[in-house]
Structures are given as C-alpha cells and as structure tokens.
Image (tube, grey):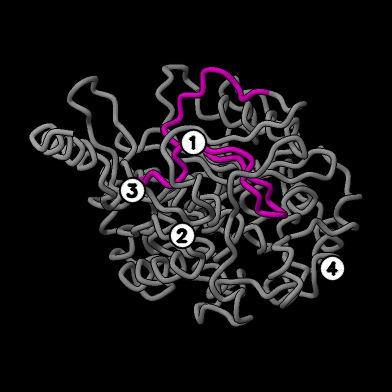
Amino acid sequence: MPALKKTALTVISAALLSTFVVSPASAVGKDASDEQPKPPAGMSKVGGELLGRAGTQVKLGPDAPVLPKDLTGRSWIVADAESGQVLASHNPHWRLPPASTLKMLFADTVMPALQPKTQKYTVKDEDLANLGEGSSLVGVKEKLTYTVHDLWLGVFLRSGNDAVHVLSSMYGGVPKTVDAMQSHAEELQALDTKVVSPDGYDAPDQVSSAYDLTLFARSGLQKADFREYCSTADAQFPGAEKNGKRESFGIQNTNKLLTGAGGVEPYKGIAGVKNGYTTHAGNTFTGVAERDGKVLLVTVMNPSSEKPHAVYDEAADLLDWGFDASGKVTPVGELVPPKSAATGTGSGKGSTATPGNDEGQNGPAQSAKAAASEGGGAGGAGIALGIAAGVVVLLAGAAFLVNRRWPLPDLVRRLPRR
C-alpha cells in the first residue's frame, strides 16, 4: 500500500475512533442534529459488559417472547429480584436525573437510624426553609408534632419533600444526609449516582441510572418498614389542631400501578416501589411485582411517548414480558451485591440488612406473621410482605456469594395475593 494512502487511512481511522472515546457518563444533553438526547458512548459496565453498551440488550431463546413494541424510555431494565439476573436492558447505566425515585436511596439510608418509628418530632421553621420551588408536599407544618411513621408515609405516598427535609433534620441535617446517601450508594455499587439533594429535586449534576435505582429498590425491600410504606395505597396523615383535637386527612400513593388512579389499570401483584417526576427528569418509575412465585424488578426512566401514563404502561409491559420470558432468555448481566457482601461486614451506616435478619427482626417468617396479624389497608404491609419479601436475604456468608439469591420465603409464598 502506498505510504500516502496508508497515512490517509491512519488519519481517517484516528478521527473515527476519536468519536468513540470513552468519556464520563453525564446527564442528558441535546443532540444538535435531531434534538433527541443520545446515551454516552461509554457507560459503566458494573453488572456485566453488555450493560455498558448503548441500546437494547436481550438474548432471546427459541421460545422467548419478543420485547414489547413502542418502548420509549431513555433507559430501562428488567431483573429477577431474587437471583439478580438482568433479563433485558436499554441504556441501563445512562446517568439521568432521577426525580423522586431517588427517595428510595434516601429511605434505605436513613430509615435504619430513625428507630423506633413511634418517636415524635416537632417541626421547626428551619426544617422547611429550603424546599425547592414547586416541590411535591404532603402538608407538614411548622410547630406541629409528627411521628417518624407519619413522615415516612408522607415520603412514600405523597412523595413529600417537606417530609424528607424533616427526616433529614432528625438524621442530622441535609448535608449529613446527602453524604450518607452517597456513601451508601457506593456501598451498593451504585456508581452512576451523584446525590445533591435528598429528595430528588432537580439539582445541578444530580444523576442516577435505571441500574442504580433498581439496586436501591432491591436493598430497600429487605427492610420490613420500607416494604410496608412503599406498598401502602392510602393512609391518614395528621393535620392541624382544632378545638384541642388533632385532625387528619387522607393521602393516596402516587404510584398509579398500585392504586389504579387516573385511569391506570392496577398491576396484579404490584408492591411499589416509587415513582417520580420533574420537568428535567421527566417521569421515572421503579416497581416490584410477583407472579407465580417469581419476583421481578423494573425501572423505566423518561419515556418520550406523549401518552399521559407512558411510564406506567411501559413498566407494566416490561413486567408482563419479564414474567413470560423468565427461563427463556439468557441473562445479559446481573444486579451486583453490596461491597460488604464479599466480606460479610456492614457498610458502617447501618443501611445494609444482615442476611436472614430482616433489619434486626426475627426473620421473614416472623415479619410475615406480624403483617398478617396487623392487617392494614389496601396495598398495605400484607401485600408488601406477600410480594416484595422475596428480596429478603436468607442465605448467609458463602452461600450468598455463590448463589447471589435473595429468596422468597415459603411461608410468605403462601400468603394470599390481591
């Protein structure tokens, strides 16, 4: 080959390769050519090499159903909550604004420290001083007293940023809470996440990913209180005092797959976990559901469809596909265990559940009995334990490392489904 031609080819090759240089993944940006955001050329490979590739990743077997049509989410993932196998994904490590789905990390980090949940706190003016404009609120008021239980209901049902800030104050303040959340994300190997605000409100550089949000849900669902709150459809929240008596008002979960609000059909077997929305993030959603003993997690971020409930429709379609495809596809990756699973030690934050201990209680069997005896409203603790307790870690030490399973207890399998 002539030297001149060889030189020209080298220059052209170098120019082409420069467009694929791996660079730090960043929040969504606009593509000047078609105004559609593009995933970065290089994304994290945590959980498997295929998960770091742009586009849809799935390995269909001979009898596997095809993926749903018309999926518009910028990023999504379907995974087995017990084994951690990722059945299919689409840009799962794309770092995008998470909106209120970040509250799953907030709860998983802070909840273990604020016990018992019956403890009371009187809200100060400064606790609510720095809420973002247009924040979702449950209606927490200064100088009124609330239990921790009340506030968590406000976080999960109404996505109340006011409740998040009060709980952050109880934890030691917003800066301490943000630092703890970041540390816990790193412990969970959720390395796409940068925490700026504890409530998920849009903030410069605050990002997460469908993969990380799924890790947060999987970790949080180990905790009985987390399962209870994220599966509660409606509750009463304390209001103002009138004539010496504390009034209350009803609140409903904003997760429409759980409640069926707004014309969305409730998803059979759903037990949470969290939805979110901001102008910058669009709609985001992470859900867990059980069918015939199989527990799946799905996360969808920012669908472009103009349908009013696209994030729920697409999540439901992916869950349906996942249940039908289970056992018929080759996994494209896995949900990694926490760092401390390799050593059998905690993160030091009290956030990672001990295998077989379910947040310091007497195991999932006792939790299930307690839920059955307590009852609860529609979508309450019984549903959460009947569905989402599948992610309780029962295998300790080496067995967990070998199998990486978060099994569904037999006792809980027998609890009736809605």
- Badge 1: how crowded within 10 Å, few (<14), some, or many (20+)? many
Q: Secondary structure at mark 3?
A: loop
**Mark 2 vs mark 3: in front:** 2
**Relative horizontal placement of residue 254, taking residue 318 as reference (left or right):** left
Q: From the image, which quarter does the C terminus lie in?
A: top right
Q: Is 376 or 69 nearer to us in this picture?
A: 69
Q: Residue sitting at 29 percent across and 46 percent down?
A: 202
Tell me where residue 410 appears, x and y as whole percent.
89, 57
In space, the residues marked 1 and 4 are separated at their CA atoms by 38 Å
Does the residue at mark 2 contact the one at mark 1 (Cβ under 8 Å)?
Answer: no
Q: Is residue 202 above or below residue 58?
A: below
Tell me where residue 374 appears, x and y as whole percent.
81, 58
**Relative horizontal placement of residue 405, taking residue 350 as reference (left or right):** right
Dot 2 or dot 3, earlier in sequence: 2
Q: Quadrant of residue 331?
A: top right
- Badge 2: how crowded within 10 Å, few (<14), some, or many (20+)? many
| Magenta span contains residue 91 | yes
Task: Identify the residue at the far left of this view.
Answer: 4
Q: Badge 1 is on which residue?
A: 90
Q: Badge 3 is on which residue?
A: 201
Q: Secondary structure at mark 1?
A: strand
